[in-house]
Amino acid sequence: MRRMAFLIDTHCHLDAPEFGDEAPLVRARAREKGIGLCVIPAVARFNFSVVRELAHRQQDAYALGIHPLCTNEAQDGDLDALDHELALRVSNDPHLVAVGEIGLDYFVDNLDDDKQERIFHIQLQLARRHDLPVIVHVRRSVDKVLKHLRQVGGGKPWHGIAHAFNGSLQQADACIALGLKLGFGGALTFDRALQVRRLATELPLDSIVMETDSPDIQPHWLYRTQAQRAAGEAQGRNEPGELRRIADVLAGLRGISPDELTAATTQNALAALPKLAALVGLQENTGHPA
Ligand SMILES: [Zn+2]
């Protein structure tokens, strides 16, 4: 059981410019707090090699995909490049664990909706072709995302994660029925995030994975309101090391011990992204406190 005493941050953009050259420091800080593995999703073709190299350097995991907010700029050749990268790495790179971050976003209103839908659909097909799980972005788009998962899945369940989930209980149940686990980021640390808190508290424990979505979705202790920012306080930067405290909040909400929550959500992450299991062994062999 000792090997399950670490947390997995299933979603952190450690290559984001907000971290600058501090990524190694940020990662070391997280390791000290018991974050054994980070999953670093790509957002566009330009960072495919960046996330791969970062994951290799840190003995972490990465995913490859085109983020919905990057679809306006995406070219058709980018999907070919993704297909090519997946074919090249899927069977001989244990650090590549999923296709992601992919999905649909109906919160931001300057996107070409036909294009984001087409690119999402093709990436789901690529995930199936290369037999990889998916990490999906579902902001105001859960029903549409489900429609495409059903179309491409053709009745076969999916592996993967619906990340930064903020839908209804019914939508959560539908995602779970398709085989996905749900991540909530730091949103669940806010008293007023009633819907997210209710889901995180009431859904079956085996359907939840932990994530920070660093550097975004600040937990409440890092969040600065508009008024605070106007008064000169900088917005806090979220990082994987915050996952321990976020997990403690969730354990409190569910009335279980932090150890129980850690063990269960780590197990869930391994179920959602099965290739992570090989990396757990790698971490142990390199002497990291996994
Ligand atoms: Zn993300």
Image (tube, rainbow, N blue to C red):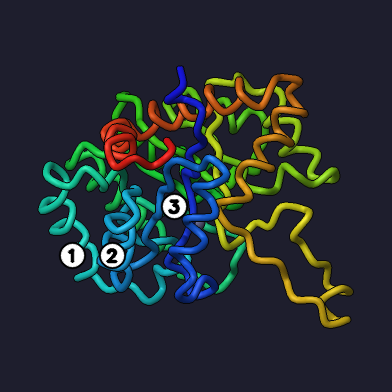
Residue of label 2: 48
Q: Nearer the viewer, residue 213 or 3?
A: 3
Amino acid type, residue under disc 1 in the picture:
Ala
Of labels 2 and 3, earlier in sequence is: 2
Of labels 2 and 1, earlier in sequence is: 2
Left or right of 201? Residue 151 is left
**Res 269 quadrant in image:** top left
Left or right of 226? Residue 50 is left
Amino acid type, residue under disc 3 in the picture:
Gly
Q: Residue at x 61, y 24 (%)?
A: 259
Measure the alpha-carbon separation of dots 3 and 1: 18 Å
Measuring from the top left, give residue 255's x and y in whole percent. 76, 20
| Secondary-structure class at tag 3 | strand
Left or right of 154? Residue 188 is right
Left or right of 220? Residue 113 is left
User: Could one spot residue 74 in this view of the protein?
Assistant: yes
Q: Residue at x 18, y 52 (%)?
A: 86
**Res 98 quadrant in image:** top left
Q: Nearer the viewer, residue 156 or 226?
A: 226
Q: Compared to 181, does 165 lie above or below?
A: below
Report crowding for label 1: few under 14, some 14 to 19, many 20 or more residues within 10 A (C-alpha): some
| Secondary-structure class at tag 2 | helix
Find out if the beta carbon at label 3 lies less than 8 Å from the nearest ligand 1 atom: no
Residue of label 1: 81
Measuring from the top left, give residue 113's x and y in whole percent. 46, 63
| Secondary-structure class at tag 1 | helix
Q: Quadrant of the C terminus?
A: top left
Q: Nearer the viewer, residue 33 or 164?
A: 33
Residue of label 3: 103
Report crowding for label 3: few under 14, some 14 to 19, many 20 or more residues within 10 A (C-alpha): many
